[in-house]
Image: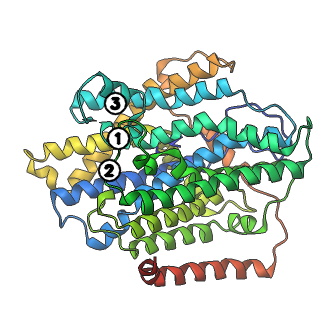
């Protein structure tokens, strides 16, 4: 949704570039694999529910449907924020340290290797299984699907190849423009070879703020203005598709970039904003706010049949904005260390979450195709219409496909891209070694994700509880607010 939806969908939890830092420099973020796994699960749950209620309208209670209907955009927001955080952070650290930014060419090669091979593998597999979606069966349609250009065609957002690929189109656009965003921040910070840290902070804040505002404005226009138009007026790049283009999601990437700036600022000797520190030290509070936002979404008029076509405009806008708040609250304690690990961080960094996060990209790409395939089988095999059987088969098939994709396609492709861009050549290993996802190195990183104990203030608890109370009140009165919108 990288990395990624997506799907960050196409990102990694370890920085791609080599940076020289002090003892406080974090080289990896062991909780992010768990966050990525959580995001993938929300998207899978959304699509599973959508298909289940088509097979059997009473298979899922309406209360659950109303909340699951919000998870598609929630998971996508997490993926996009992870991309913004992981990919912008090396540029910011280099800027703060007065060093050269990562080379754009190498960056694009590695990002392309992170997305395209796994995507092509899933697309070809879905075509062979007969579950790929094509508006037309001709060369242009296939080229559009393999080139990840579907969202730029009048009727191609969900009609070229994989339905979930629309998030990858957005990811690729972000990758293409990210070096320019970082370069603009350098430009406005001054011509000095090593500008003042305050100037670097200010210039990056300006860029991030502008991106967030563009994202909010573009989404508002796509929902409330363009939504009144009858349809696209041209075949390629119709403004009618604005809601599926990068500008309408720049706020999600921008908030991830904001967290990257906060992380880089702290690790290069600065002090983070007090509010960030307070909630980073209390993951339960941050995730509690995210939970309240999800509950609020269930009260925002979500339909009993999940899907974009069933949303009223005000509901769609509220869904997106609350999903962004919830996603930000989910990611915050995973990227900003606290004075203690806590149970939540340990769970996110645990072996099951790490393994699921490692193969999350493949799971994101394959799951809907396999769900559709099982749904077709259910027409001749009534046993598959049982919700527990259907869900179990979908999860097992998705897990196998994701693992095969990671071992045979994604991991080798990333290694080749690393070598091609001047990185260290991996040691020669047997296939058995390639087929095992190593957890030991990851396990050693979580203990380093702790800050020295800082002075706490009595007001900190008051701020936390007040924020949670305000969120709860907002959720309570959201139906009235929706009516006003």
- As measured in the structure, the alpha-carbon distance from the residue carrying label 1 to the one carrying label 2 is 9 Å
Question: Contact (CB < 8 A) between labels 3 and 1?
Answer: no
Q: Which residue is mark 1?
A: 154
- Asked which secondary structure carries label 3, the reply is helix
- Asked which secondary structure carries label 1, the reply is loop
Please state the horizontal and vertical placement of residue 93, each as a whole percent of the image: 79, 42
- As measured in the structure, the alpha-carbon distance from the residue carrying label 3 to the one carrying label 2 is 28 Å
Residue 350 visible in rendering: no
- Mark number, residue 123: 3
Instruction: Please give left or right for residue 270 compared with residue 69 in the image.
Output: right
Task: Decide: few, some or many residues near mark 1? Use Cα within 10 Å; few <14, some 14-19, many ≥20.
Answer: some
Q: Which residue is mark 2?
A: 231
Total labels: the figure holds 3
Residue pictured at 18% horizontal, 67% vertical: 58
Question: Contact (CB < 8 A) between labels 1 and 2?
Answer: yes
Farthest residue toward the front?
A: 233
């Amino acid at each position: 949704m990288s990395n990624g939806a997506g799907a960050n969908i196409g990102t990694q939890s370890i920085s791609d570039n080599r940076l020289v830092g002090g003892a406080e420099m974090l080289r990896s973020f062991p909780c992010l694999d768990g966050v990525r796994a959580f995001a993938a699960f929300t998207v899978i749950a959304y699509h599973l529910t959508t298909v289940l209620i088509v097979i059997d309208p009473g298979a899922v209670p309406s209360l659950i449907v109303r909340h699951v209907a919000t998870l598609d955009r929630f998971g996508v927001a997490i993926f996009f924020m992870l991309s913004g955080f992981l990919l912008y952070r090396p540029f910011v650290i280099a800027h703060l340290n007065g060093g050269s930014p990562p080379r754009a060419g190498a960056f694009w090669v590695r990002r392309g290797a992170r997305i395209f091979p796994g995507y092509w593998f899933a697309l070809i597999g879905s075509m062979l299984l007969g579950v790929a979606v094509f508006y037309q069966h001709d060369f242009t349609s296939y080229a559009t699907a393999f080139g990840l250009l579907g969202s730029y065609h009048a009727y191609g957002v969900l009609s070229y190849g994989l339905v979930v690929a629309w998030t990858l189109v957005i990811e690729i656009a972000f990758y293409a423009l990210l070096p320019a965003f970082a370069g603009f921040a350098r430009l406005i910070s001054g011509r000095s070879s090593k500008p003042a840290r305050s100037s670097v902070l200010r210039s990056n804040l300006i860029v991030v703020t502008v991106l967030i505002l563009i994202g909010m404005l573009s989404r508002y226009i796509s929902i409330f203005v363009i939504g009144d138009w009858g349809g696209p007026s041209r075949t390629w790049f119709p403004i009618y598709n604005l809601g599926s283009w990068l500008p309408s999601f720049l706020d999600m990437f921008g908030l991830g970039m904001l967290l990257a700036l906060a992380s880089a600022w702290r690790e290069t000797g600065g002090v983070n904003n007090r509010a960030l520190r307070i909630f980073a030290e209390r993951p339960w509070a941050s995730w509690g706010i995210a939970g309240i936002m999800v509950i609020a979404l269930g009260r925002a008029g979500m339909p009993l049949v999940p899907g974009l076509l069933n949303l009223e405009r005000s509901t769609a806008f509220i869904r997106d904005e609350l999903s962004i708040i919830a996603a930000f609250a989910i990611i915050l304690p995973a990227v900003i260390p606290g004075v203690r690990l806590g149970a939540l961080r340990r769970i996110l960094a645990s072996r099951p979450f790490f393994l699921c996060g490692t193969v999350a990209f493949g799971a994101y790409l394959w799951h809907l195709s396999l769900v559709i395939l099982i749904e077709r089988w259910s027409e001749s095999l009534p046993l598959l219409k049982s919700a527990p059987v259907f869900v179990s088969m979908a999860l097992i098939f998705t897990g196998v496909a994701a693992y095969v994709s990671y071992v045979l396609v994604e991991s080798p492709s990333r290694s080749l891209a690393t070598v091609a861009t001047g990185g260290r050549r991996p040691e020669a290993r047997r296939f058995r070694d390639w087929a095992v996802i190593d957890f030991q190195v990851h396990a050693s990183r979580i203990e380093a994700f702790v800050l020295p104990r800082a002075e706490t203030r009595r007001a900190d608890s008051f701020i936390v509880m007040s924020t949670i109370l305000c969120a709860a009140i907002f959720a309570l009165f959201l139906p009235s607010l929706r009516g006003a919108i």
